[in-house]
Image: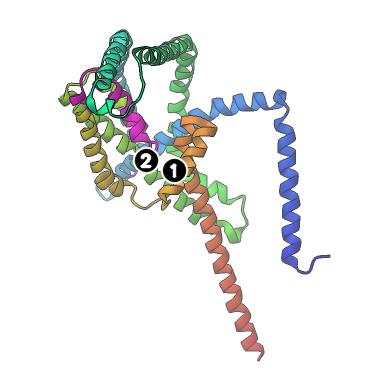
Amino acid sequence: MFPNEKLKHLFFWTIELLAIATLLFIVFRFDFLMKPISVFAGTVFIPLLVSGFLYYCLKPLQKLIEKIPLGKRRVARSVAVLLTFTIFMVVIIGAFMIFVPLILNEITNLITAMPSVVNHIQDYVKDMLEEPWFKKLNLSISDDDIRNAVSTYASSFVRITAGTLTGFVGAATSFTIGALTVPIILFYMLSDSNRFLPALQKFFPKNRSEDVMVLGRELDKTIERYISGQAIQMLFVGFTMSIGFGMIGLPYIWLLGFIAGVANIVPYVGPFIGVFPALLVAISINWKMLIGIIILMAIVQQVNGSIIYPALIGKSLRIHPLTVMLLLLAAGNLWGMVGMIVVVPFYAIIRTIILYIVKLRQVQQHEETVSNLTKKIEED
């Protein structure tokens, strides 16, 4: 029926994939089956994601502690885990005691000042419309249009704020559960991470166990370098932007700096998302401050892109910028901000696995070719 063995395997796997896709499509249509699964996955996924992120942030510190010499010996792994976890908890508790009250206070002040901010933005737009250069554009924009647009955005802000306050109890509950579970998961990740690859090897044949170990170590290095580098970038951008906002005279510096730092985790588009709230606040004050923020962002991102990013992450991902942009667009539409955060490292993992399998296959083919040639020579 089939002219060769390759076409037979291709036909077989095509039928298998179509059958699996059809089965998944049918299963996804039953809400009573998928809803509990989605709720369970959503509940478990976020703590695991946060714990994994913190694990790779702390892993370089744990390695550094393990290398500390104690006479002829070095620090034991269990001691290094305890020290790393203790340092992490002290830093987190200290940050919560110092920065969380500041940020919450600035959020309260910003909500209180929102009507004044809206009025200032409205006046700024009116003044801009009166400028000669703008009148040359021949755009028909009336005061009513301005008021309606500003009112629309203001009402949207009020709805978002009201929705946030309404869901505060649920968010507080989720945060409390996460605050209790994430440290526990993180501690076990730190202490038992060296057992993961040996346990994974047991599921593969003996002739593939070494390949699994090599691939696992390569993936681990890639993820560690990317996540730890992203964490340091976030801290650098957040603190430098906050200090820069303070030097310019912008209010709510810690809140706006926090937003800029967290948004920087999204490649390429994150810096623009993070600085947008600061630009809105600056518009409500004066145009000179707006220019100052643009200059500040350019300087910080130039230092980050030229020095921080190459030193920490470098070419560990080797993903083309256009590919990253397409991934961000797709993930943002499908899964929102969380998707934009995880899609790049997830793609890097899949890409590394595929490239390693292809490389391994090429080596096997080369070995088979050499073996066949050797046998042929011996037969001759």
Q: Quadrant of the N terminus?
A: bottom right
* Residue lying at 53% horizontally and 32% vertically, measured from the top left: 335
Of helix, strand and loop, which one carries label 2?
A: loop
The residue at which mark 2 appears reads as 268
Does any portion of residue 335 appear in the rendered image? Answer: yes
* Residue lying at 34% horizontally and 33% vertically, measured from the top left: 272
Residue 368: image location, x then y, percent = 61, 74
Label count reads 2
Kind of residue at badge 1 = Met
- Gap in Å between the C-alphas at discs 2 and 1? 8 Å
Q: Are marks 2 and 1 in contact (CB under 8 Å)?
A: yes
The residue at which mark 1 appears reads as 325
Kind of residue at badge 2 = Tyr
Which region is colored magenta? 261-290
Whichever of callouts 2 and 1 sits on the residue coming sooner in the sequence is: 2
Question: Callout 1 environment at 10 Å: few (<14), some (14 to 19), or many (20+)?
Answer: some
Q: Is residue 359 magenta?
A: no
Q: Is residue 281 magenta?
A: yes
